[in-house]
Image (cartoon, rainbow, N blue to C red):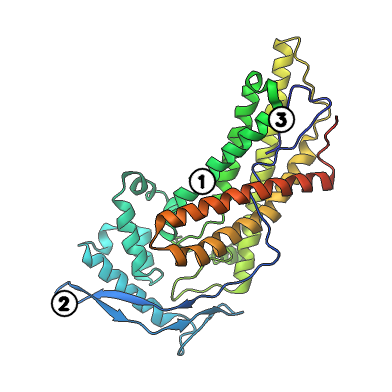
Amino acid sequence: MITAVSSHLASQFIVSPCLCNHYFPSSVTYVFLNTHLRRTTLSSNSSPKVLSRPSFDIFSSADGSDVGGGDNSDGTVEKKLNRGEALGALAEVGRSLSNIPDDLAVAIESGKIPAMVVHRYFDLENSPVLGWLLRFGGFKERLLADDLFLTKVAIECGVGIFAKTAAELAGRQENFTRELDFVFADLAMAIIADFMLVWLPAPTVSLQPPLSVNAGCLNKFFYACPDNAFQVAFAGMSYSLLQRIGAIMRNGGKLFVVGTGASLIGTGLTVLLIAARIAIVASFDGETNDLPILPTSVAYGVFMAVSSNLRYQILAGVIEQRILEPLFHEHKFILGTMCFAIRTGNTFLGSLMWVAYAHWIGIQTING
């Protein structure tokens, strides 16, 4: 978020970086997990029993096929197992394909999701708040992939609000309470940007309807891409290297629009508020002549599209899904605590990096 701080805007312009909650590792590494799958199914008397499933060392190959034991390059065997076990999970709770949402029923019928996703759906359905959110496609796809998704949204927005408020207080100092209208405008834009930084790269369970036959090649390509370049594919599904790169490109474009738009709205609103103050209060000495609105907004959009995009995809797809989730899957409190610590550190480091970037391209100047 780009903010003009203090009432002396003619001589002082500070770019507040608290939306850029990022860190930057020295390299990007794919982590491939050795997957040992055990599934449950139902016997004829509906009592669940555990069936052993062969172990596969799953790797994402260049052509998008999963390299594992046996001739199963298209995942047909895995999809059939997914379908049978997901139907068994439905029968276990007395449900059928006819009394669950259509998109979930289609995914089960096609073998796209395993039984654990079905069990998670019923667990979430029992919660008044989460059950209500399951009615919305975007939330459903993310909650089924990560039951801590809302927790991570709360962490990101909460840390962002705290850091942003601290930055506003440090910048405005004795003018903080007198300029609360500016502060609230900045915080509103910060919340929007922080939410999108969690939403876009979050791993998802694909429940999208099929594209029409008339869809263009570009639409078909991005349709097949994951929402996170590093997310783990379910058994029977796979993503090629090109599709994973496509996830970075697609989210980068969206974040450029979000970042540029948020900055334009926030900075533009600040300008309007200052103009209104000057018109109402003759003694108010704020000026906006030196406020580089468009260059700063575009620069922030580029920063989010490249730097924020990569960091948040790595954070959600590698650190959280591939490392923390397997280690602390049975200990949700520890997992949530670890996510809080990492995202808090990410906020601080990202803020420093935005300041360095803003100085480097010459959009931030601080005059005595």
Q: Which residue is mark 2?
A: 44
Q: Name which residue lies at 66% across and 29% down.
A: 169
- In the picture, the disc for residue 211 is none
Q: Which residue is mark 3?
A: 171
User: CA gap, disc 3 to disc 1?
Assistant: 24 Å
Side of 31 where 117 appears, left or right: left
Crowding near the residue tagged with mark 1, few <14, some 14–19, many ≥20 C-alpha atoms within 10 Å: many
Q: Which residue is mark 1?
A: 155
Q: Name which residue lies at 65% across and 52% down.
A: 22
| Residue 367 drawn at (x, y percent) | 85, 31
- What element does badge 3 sit on? helix
Side of 169 where 356 appears, left or right: right
Task: Look at the picture and state if 361 lies above or below 167.
Answer: below
Crowding near the residue tagged with mark 2, few <14, some 14–19, many ≥20 C-alpha atoms within 10 Å: few
Identify the amino acid type marked 2: Ser
Q: Earlier in the sequence, mark 2 or mark 1?
A: 2
Q: Earlier in the sequence, mark 3 or mark 1?
A: 1
| Residue 275 drawn at (x, y percent) | 73, 19
Q: Nearer the viewer, residue 221 or 295?
A: 295
Q: Name which residue lies at 75% across and 44% down.
A: 355
On-image quarter of the C terminus: top right
On-image quarter of the N terminus: top right
User: CA gap, disc 2 to disc 1?
Assistant: 45 Å
Q: Earlier in the sequence, mark 3 or mark 2?
A: 2
Task: Look at the picture and state if 324 lies above or below 307.
Answer: below
Identify the amino acid type marked 3: Gly
Task: Look at the picture and state if 102 lies above or below 20.
Answer: below
Identify the amino acid type marked 1: Ile
